[in-house]
Amino acid sequence: MRAFNAELSKLFSLPSIWLAFLIGAFAPAVFAALDSLAQKEEIIAGVSTRLSEVGYIGLGFGVQGVIILGVLAVSSEYLTESSESGGGQQITTSLTVVKSRFHFLLAKAGVVTVISILLCIVAMITIVPTTHYILGEYAPAFEWSRLIGAVCYWVFTALLAFGITLLTKNGIIPLTVLMINSSVVSFSVLLSKISKLAFYLPDRAGLEMFMFTSDKSNTPPTGSLFDRFHTPFTGGLVMFAWVVVIFIVAAIIFHRRDVAS
């Protein structure tokens, strides 16, 4: 528990973490509002094919906050301190204080997980009134099963960012790639036009935990951003498997690489 509290304290001491909180808490509502305004006429007219995704799409695009969180949790350990502070790295102190590297990583991952859950809950709290304010009685119903799927998506995404940064020891590459992939161009969507294997990439599978409403025909609504391939449960399992594999590989490499620190 002391390791968890220490990692929580270190994370809150980083100035950039407040940007992650700001984006994670409020960006989803902004995306949801813009989507609601864009779809409002069609929704009121009853011809919209994306009503079930309005609001939830904010949770899909607003995941950048936890990406920053996952990257910062690791990259901050490898920043070189000022010469006045000795010019060393935080990772040296961390591995000296916490003797077990497994407990060190577990504490960090635990902090990232808890904050991701709280951020996603705050995002939901901002999204629901936003969509109801814009759409009124036409606002979609927010189902608990899909909201839980969104929470899992945020947590898994944050842990993926955490694991990838642990592998690279640098936050620039994972931050750039993951931010672009989640907001500008989804590489998995592009690759899915070439091969169905792309449907098993973590972000593509994870989105299906909450972006679609189950129906009897199992047929995606016309005009959806994606075509359904997984059930929400299967999509969650696929993304969870990616998280486990990347975390195990990163933990092994971290132990061998930094054991002398």
Image (spheres, rainbow, N blue to C red):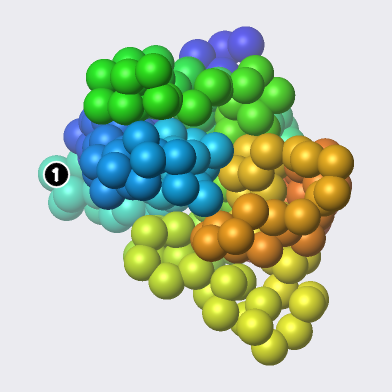
Is residue 226 in view from this perspective? yes
Residue at the extreme front of the image, as rendered = 45
Tell me the residue that label 1 is attached to: 84
Point out the residue furthest to the top here. Answer: 1
- Label 1: how many Cα within 10 Å (few below 14, some 14–19, many 20+): few
Q: Position of residue 235 (x, y in %)?
A: 77, 49
User: What's the residue at 62%, 21% (across, down)?
Assistant: 143
| Residue 14 position (above or below residue 126) | below
Q: Amino acid at mark 1?
A: Glu
Q: Residue at x 56, y 79 (%)?
A: 190
Element type at mark 1: helix
Residue 36 position, x and y percent, is 32, 39
Question: Could you tell me if residue 173 is visible in this image?
Answer: no
Measuring 30% from the left and 40% from the top, which residue is drawn there? Answer: 40
- Left or right: where does residue 158 sit relative to residue 20? right
Front residue (pair 190, 114):
190
Q: Is residue 180 above or below residue 231?
A: below
